[in-house]
Image: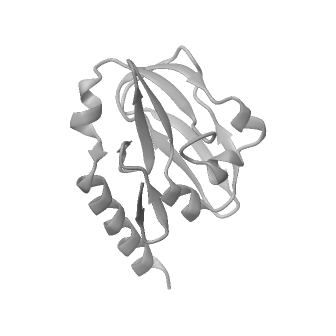
Amino acid sequence: MAIIESYEVPEDLYYTRDHAWVRIEGNQIRIGVTDFMQKMAGEITFIRLPRAGKDLGTDKTLFTLQSGKWSGKVMVPVAGKVVDANKDLAAAPKPMNDEPYGKGWVALMEPVNMADVASQLLFGDAAIAFLKDEIKRNAQAKP
């Protein structure tokens, strides 16, 4: 696992530009929020989970979340069907902060085209470069 400043970045995952991670698991992908997102958001207090069985395109919101200082959404990383959501998070979203790459996962999807994961998402050096730019951009935005 890479550590960029104080942010954990598992090197075997794909990443989106809205700070979600994607893990390939056979013909499905598991999705959650990055360590960067959960640290920037602070304690996540609410999440609206996607509904299993729903077909979603990349122009759709996968889930929304809120903390005491922020609310936002994560878009669908690649087109596909939601096959499961981590229902435990609805009542207790704390794992999203405590274990964002483990028990804090949000959704499981079956992509229409698995090749889209590699062609449309960030991986390896590209993901690390993106995170470094986001850290710098965020530091400049603070007064």
Relative placement, left or right, of 93 versus 7 is right
Q: Nearer the viewer, residue 19 or 95?
A: 95
Residue displayed at 46% across by 23% down? 109
Relative image position of residue 31 (x, y in whole percent): 48, 36
Which residue extends farthest front? 1
User: Which residue is farthest bottom?
Assistant: 143
- Horizontal and vertical percent position of residue 114: 29, 23
Residue 89, given in percent of the width and then of the height, sits at 70, 37
Of residue 130 and residue 66, the one placed in the foreground of this image is: 130
- Check the image and report above or below for 31 versus 72: above
Please say if 136 is above or below 82. Answer: below
The colour scheme used to paint the residues is one colour
Please, which residue is most extreme toward the right here?
A: 91
Q: Residue at x 54, y 14 (%)?
A: 53
Toward the left, the furthest residue is 119
Q: Is residue 113 above or below residue 43?
A: above
How many marks do you count on the picture? 0
Tell me if 82 is positioned left or right of 17 in this view. right
Closest to the observer, 2 or 33: 2
Instruction: Give the quarter of the figure containing the N terminus.
Output: bottom left
Q: What residue do we see at 29% from left, 32% from top?
A: 117
Q: Toward the viewer: 80 or 5?
A: 5
Residue depicted at 39% across the width and 20% down the height = 26
Give the quadrant of residue 121. Answer: top left
- Spot occupied by residue 131 in the image (x, y as percentages of width and height): 36, 61
